[in-house]
């Protein structure tokens, strides 16, 4: 296991010598067995910050897999998922627990797990996060989790689609947040989502327009080709991705039609 501290719990005191020792061991492992024991002690402690630190470590271990590192925490997949689900079912940590800075950190750590593990049954929990006042530590993970659920779902999760749409069309929100919400929404091909993509073509930001156009092209190019072409014609010739990708999709479709 490689060295890592935490994403969300810097400076938060656990208030228990045994848990503090487990935290130190996990952050700088002396050996694999000791680090595993420390992880389990934190995960099963029932202490909000300790559990959150364990969840952060699990997500870090998952993220390191793509770089070729082994992950000995995989044996705890189900337990970690259940802990994360329980956190999201409950209200965010009370500010009185160890100060106002605690509020929402547990949800942020839980949502890191959902990026790779969320299932359709988690839709309600993720939608509640998106419906709540913005928590900037948690929202990016919530958007990505929502996108995963929409990609997995064969049906239409109207609550999740509506929650994402609310962010996409909120002019008061940062454009990056709106873009992440639209990227998550683009995983859905539901009639409601397709209607939202058509609306998003009229937004002022070119990247939002192009992301919506790309989603329409991916899900239903035949029905929306003329609409996409008309919008693409308004973009600068050197417009970057995803506008360039939209034009590539249109060109490839033209080539395919000529070959038939």
Image (tube, helix red, strand yellow):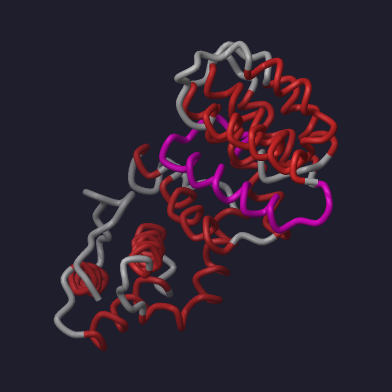
Residue numbers of the magenta segment: 130-156
Q: Position of residue 91 (x, y in %)?
A: 57, 47
- Nearer to the camera, 61 or 28: 61
Q: Position of residue 20 (x, y in %)?
A: 21, 67
On the picture, is 11 further left or further right than 114?
A: left
Examine the rendered structure and indicate whether residue 142 appears above or below residue 222: below
On the picture, is 191 further left or further right than 141?
A: right
Q: Residue at x 39, y 78 (%)?
A: 73
Examine the rendered structure and indicate whether residue 49 appears above or below residue 164: below
Q: In the rendered structure, does residue 22 fall within the stretch colored magenta?
A: no
Q: Position of residue 253 (x, y in %)?
A: 71, 38
Examine the rendered structure and indicate whether residue 129 appears above or below residue 211: below
On the picture, is 121 further left or further right than 33?
A: right
- Nearer to the camera, 197 or 117: 197
Examine the rendered structure and indicate whether residue 61 appears above or below residue 7: below
Q: How many marks?
A: 0
- Nearer to the camera, 82 or 231: 231
Q: Residue at x 51, y 31 (%)?
A: 134
Q: In the rendered structure, does residue 139 fall within the stretch colored magenta?
A: yes
Q: Residue at x 61, y 19 (%)?
A: 170
Which residue is situated farthest in the front direction here? 259
Q: Quadrant of residue 218?
A: top right
Q: Quadrant of residue 5?
A: bottom left
Q: Position of residue 243 (x, y in %)?
A: 54, 27
On the picture, is 106 further left or further right than 71?
A: right
Quadrant of image for the N terminus: bottom left
């Amino acid at each position: 296991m490689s060295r890592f501290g935490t994403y969300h719990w810097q400076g938060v005191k656990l208030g228990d010598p045994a848990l503090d020792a487990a935290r130190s061991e996990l952050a700088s492992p002396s050996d694999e067995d000791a680090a595993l024991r420390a992880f389990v002690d934190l995960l099963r402690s029932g202490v909000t910050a300790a559990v959150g630190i364990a969840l952060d470590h699990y997500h870090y271990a998952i993220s390191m897999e793509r770089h070729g590192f082994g992950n000995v925490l995989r044996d705890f997949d189900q337990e970690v998922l259940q802990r994360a689900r329980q956190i999201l079912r409950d209200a965010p940590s009370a500010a009185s627990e160890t100060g106002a800075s605690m509020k929402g950190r547990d949800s942020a750590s839980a949502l890191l797990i959902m990026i790779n593990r969320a299932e359709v049954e988690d839709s309600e929990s993720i939608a509640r996060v998106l419906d709540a006042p913005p928590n900037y530590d948690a929202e990016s993970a919530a958007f990505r989790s929502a996108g995963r659920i929409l990609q997995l779902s064969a049906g239409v999760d109207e609550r999740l689609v509506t929650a994402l749409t609310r962010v996409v069309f909120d002019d008061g929100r940062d454009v990056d947040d709106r873009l992440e919400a639209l990227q998550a929404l683009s995983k859905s091909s539901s009639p409601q989502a397709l209607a939202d993509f058509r609306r998003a073509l009229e937004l002022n930001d070119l990247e939002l327009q192009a992301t919506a156009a790309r989603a329409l092209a991916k899900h239903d190019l035949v029905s929306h080709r003329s609409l996409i072409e008309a919008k693409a014609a308004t973009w600068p010739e050197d417009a970057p991705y995803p506008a360039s990708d939209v034009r590539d999709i249109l060109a490839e479709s033209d080539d395919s039609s000529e070959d038939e």
